[in-house]
Amino acid sequence: MTFISYAQNFEDVMLWRALKHVERGFYIDVGAFSPDLDSVTRAFSERGWRGINIEPNPHYLAQLNARRPHDANLGIAVSDFDGEIELSVIEDTGLTTVDMSIAEGHANAGWGLSHITVPTQTLAQVWDGHVPEGQAVHFLKVDVEGHEASVLRGADWSRHRPWIVVVEATLPTTQITSYLDWEEVLTQAGYAFVYWDGLNRYYLAKEHEDLADRFSAPPNVFDQFVVQGHALANERLAELDGTVSTLTTSLNQAVEERAALERNLGGLQGSLGDLQRSVDSLASLNTLLEREVKDSLHALSALSRESDDQRRALGEAMDEVRSSHLKLDYMLSRSVWERLLFRRSGRPRKPLRVLLFHKSGKPRGVFRRWVLRRNGRARKFFRMWMSSPGYQALPRAVRIPVPTAESESAPTVPADLSPRARYFLKRLEMPQTRGPED
């Protein structure tokens, strides 16, 4: 299996050369940054290793939680004390730092800067809290943008012995070395310097000095590795090769299909002449049929208009007959009281109209039961007038509901009216001997 290097300076290649004999090892990455970009631990995670990723930047911590669910991902800063510390966040970079002088330098260089407060613990506390009992830590990587000395001073080197320690040894974004500030912490703890890659210094615990020869040369062809960009390019090339192969197969099939079509084309061309002659004959016939259809449509349109006119005239005549029949039936069936109180059109005479109705057409409240039944329908002797267009055009006219069997069977005279009113209504609704019209 070819080793893919994701680290920015081949740190993972050097560590894998020394530790590839370890199956499913353990790491601590202080200043982990991204789970994928410039990651020292991704290649190990893909091979079943587990460990602790420490990244106080909330943006990259969320990515670590999503991509490394089997690791312990801690959103804290590591220093030589337990408490809180102000963190300068440089967005979209791995330059986040607790060193204010370094942060000011980034700001002066034009980087966007924000400040947050995060918890801080010592490396000894992190080890005690998250490294399983008896678990060896095979490498510790420290990259904290100028705060390395405080991280290393916060470790308990007598109890906690990572095999290999890799520490960034230059000031951020420069080639100025800074290891003299902290190297003595490691040498006094029994760690020997074994390799310098231009950015990081590698230290080996004295109890694992047998691995020192693994650091005698920089990454080279014998490490059998490729960088991430080359690996992605090779994957893309393989995909393109597959696509080309598929396209070549499709092209060969298309060539064979074209040859078959050309063989059939000769026979089709022979039939084309016959088809063209048939088409010309059908076109002439179609022209004659179109003229006949157009003439028929004109005649049908004229008949349709004439039928519509007759239907409209018949409807108007039927409406007049129906209206005349209703008026005649009403006038012939009126009682003496109705003749005295109502005109032939069904409209109440003025004294009765003024007594029972407002000018707006709304029945007066005290006489409402005289005019309307309980179901809202007009009583028989007001119905013709209140159903007329003239009444319905009044601003507050009562809308007469459609009659139903239930409403027709409602009592004629309300029981709660005075005796005089009940007598009056009964007389109005009582069949009378027909007399001369007024």
Image: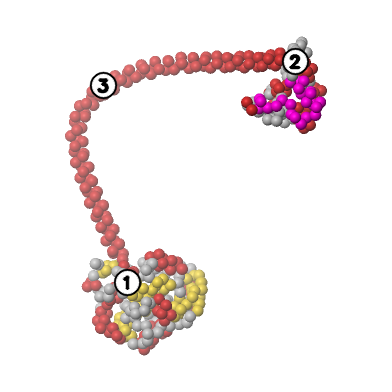
Residue 106, position as x, y percentages in the image: 46, 73
User: CA gap, disc 1 to disc 3?
Assistant: 81 Å
Quadrant of residue 67 within the rendered picture: bottom left
Which callout, 2 or 3, points to the residue nearer the camera?
2
Tell me the tag on residue 277.
Answer: 3
Q: Quadrant of the C terminus?
A: top right
Q: Secondary structure at mark 3?
A: helix
Give the labeled residue for mark 1: 49
Q: Are marks 2 and 3 in contact (CB under 8 Å)?
A: no
Span colored in magenta: 407-429
Q: Nearer the viewer, residue 38 or 164?
A: 164
Instruction: Name the residue rendered at 75%, 15% in the picture.
Output: 432
Where residue 237 appears, as percent x and y from the top left, is 26, 58
Q: Is residue 404 visible?
A: yes
- Residue 432's label in the rendered image is 2
Instruction: Identify the image quadrant of the N terminus.
Output: bottom left
Q: Position of residue 26 (x, y in %)?
A: 33, 75
- Give left or right: position of 120 versus 401: left
Please say whether residue 141 is visible from this viewpoint.
no
Please name whichever residue, 397 or 274, is drawn nearer the observer in this view of the structure.
397
Q: Which circle's residue, 1 or 3, is located before the other in the chain?
A: 1
Q: Amino acid at mark 1?
A: Trp
Which of discs 1 and 3 lies nearer the camera? The answer is 1
Comes first in the chain, label 2 or label 3: 3
Does label 1 or label 2 sit earlier along the sequence? 1
Q: Between 82 and 96, which is closer to the camera in this rendering?
A: 82
User: Label 2 sits on what residue type?
Assistant: Gln
Residue 421 on the magenta segment: yes
